[in-house]
Image (cartoon, rainbow, N blue to C red):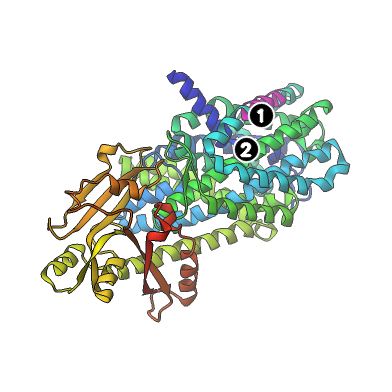
Amino acid sequence: MRDAVRLAVVVGALGVVFGDIGTSPIYTLQTVFNPHDPHPVPVSQGNVFGVVSLVFWSVMIIVTVTYVLLAMRADNDGEGGIMALITLLRRMGKGRGGRTAALLAGLGIFGAALFFGDSMITPAISVLSAVEGIKIVEPSLEELVVPITAMIIVVLFLVQRFGAAAVGRMFGPVMIVWFVTVGALGVAGIAGHPAILKALSPTYALGFLVNHFGTAFFALAAVVLAVTGAEALYADMGHFGRPAISRAWLLLVFPACVLSYLGQGALILDDADNRSGPFFLLAPGWARLPLVLLATAATVIASQAVITGAYSVASQAAELGYLPRLRIVHTSESTFGQIYVPWINWVLMVSVLTLVFAFRSSAALAFAFGMAVTGTITITTLMFFYVARWKWQVPRWVLGLGASGLLLVDLLFVAANLTKIVHGAWLPLLIALTAFTVMTTWQRGRQIVTAQRQRHEGSLREFVDQLRTGALPTTRVPGTAVFLNRGKQTAPLALRANVEHNHVRHDLVVILSIETLPVPRVPAGRRTAVDDLGYTDDGITHVTAWFGYMETPDVIGILRALDPEVTEGQLDLAQASFFLSKIQLTSGEAPTMARWRKRLFIATSHLTADAAQHFGLPRDHTVIMGSHIEV
């Protein structure tokens, strides 16, 4: 039974995690030897051996070593990705070396912003590259490539609401067929030119770099396409866990991709004209149309990998205070990380469609793709080694050797992709800069608002004491009032406004704080904790309610289950009033941020999920009381 569950998780991971990196063979070598590239790589035996060797060792070093063997060991309660590293670095920032950790965390935010660019470009280039295969089967169908791609992308984003697990179960078997097919076609190509197996030796990659550095350096900008999706492996770790992802990579995905690259290299050695589409040309004529259909399905799955990764990054960014509280739908009772974020989903869909209609070919997008990938990988590597030193106390000399070797590889790729700035590499940098600006602006604005809100709210204990002593004269009116609050340290703004401006309070007042725990469901016996706030006869109590991530907070159900003795009276829930505190943000004159950043922060605040809907409050009994705070 346990083995069956493990197998199901591995199959699910194949259907969600490996689509991006698993479809890289479709376009990597084709892009390297593209004659229309600003820095084309001539087809020769030495160049083909060198490029194939570079591809193999790049995948080995970056994906297998950096991510699968190293980075995936650094998790934050099971969650992976660059945001998990940022969380770890922020914890480090509270101790020794805090300034360096904070600087690296800031760099990590830019890496996360680059990943958002990656998650926009990947669906566009992946699906385009597969659909373009119909040009090889029937050149007259070229005009249908863009419309077909757009329709596929729309359908892909529409099914996201069913969750990564459901999508994985559907896509997993397809990806098994895909990798078996890719590997088999690679073996067929190798059989025609077995000498290509020599490219597995690192001497060919090093010889190509040393003896033909000019050609090899520019080739790296396309070779990096072979490792696209590496960050998605890490970001999706919360969905399926490290063991399932590692097994799937080492036992199926990596061997299949390597065989395909070797087979394509052999095909190009046989005939230089095969560089126009070596992946599809590996298949016999009768099998090319089915291969195009299978490739299209696989690239849809490739898009799935970065889409779910983007959900994870956005969710973790919101938890860390770099994005507002977005509406998040948990789609699995067994895995906390399987989520769907509607707002991110629709932004990605519009962005991907825009890229498809603007660039119209995978070749045009390829120049943009590498910049996002290499930037994210380099930042992840740098952050990981700093975390490794702090978390596992790895000796400095070991870290120095490992970090210098891996960072040298990463920086070579970054430098090569910088040469493509004017050819499209500016796009992911622009997307990243925009996302970075939004996230850092929200984080700074949130700090300002939180500090001012705490001053406005004041201590809850002191507020209750003032009511008790009459320092805040009020008239008690019949009925029950429920105030939702973030905790019990400060008084709800709505309660304070009611007392200070209306000079009234209800007979029974419940201050309710709701917290979500990283478990699917919370037992009924552990649902609530009640605090009388120092007095047992004033009718004011604080209730903390805990819910699991698969549960929808039920405010009415919580209150109905409370014992009248602990709430200092019977709550009249049929006629109760529910109060929410709403902050009205305005741009002030204080030099807290630049004026344009204040406007951006206020605009971003409108994305925050609706609290009344989220907590299931009765609309006709809910009162929203606002308070103005200047940013």
| Side of 588 relative to 261 (left or right) | left
Q: Nearer the viewer, residue 217 or 86?
A: 86
Q: Quadrant of the N terminus?
A: top left
Mark 2 crowdedness (10 Å alpha carbons): few <14, some 14-19, many ≥20: many
Mark 1 crowdedness (10 Å alpha carbons): few <14, some 14-19, many ≥20: many
Residue 487 x/y as whole percent? 27, 56
Question: Which secondary structure dominates the residues rendered in magenta?
Answer: helix
Res. 256 visible in picture: no
| Side of 516 relative to 179 (left or right) | left
Residue 50 x/y as whole percent? 67, 37
Cα distance in 3D space between marks 2 and 1: 11 Å
Q: Nearer the viewer, mark 2 or mark 1?
A: 2
Q: Residue furthest right?
A: 140
| Side of 173 relative to 496 (left or right) | right
Residue tagged 2 = 301
- Badge 1 amino acid: Trp
- Tell me the element at label 2: helix
Residue 436 x/y as whole percent? 50, 61
Answer whether residue 186 is magenta in the image: yes
- The structure residue drawn at horizontal position 60% and vertical position 30%, both measured from the top left corner, is 201
Residue tagged 1 = 178
Q: Earlier in the sequence, mark 2 or mark 1?
A: 1
Q: Nearer the viewer, residue 410 or 312?
A: 312
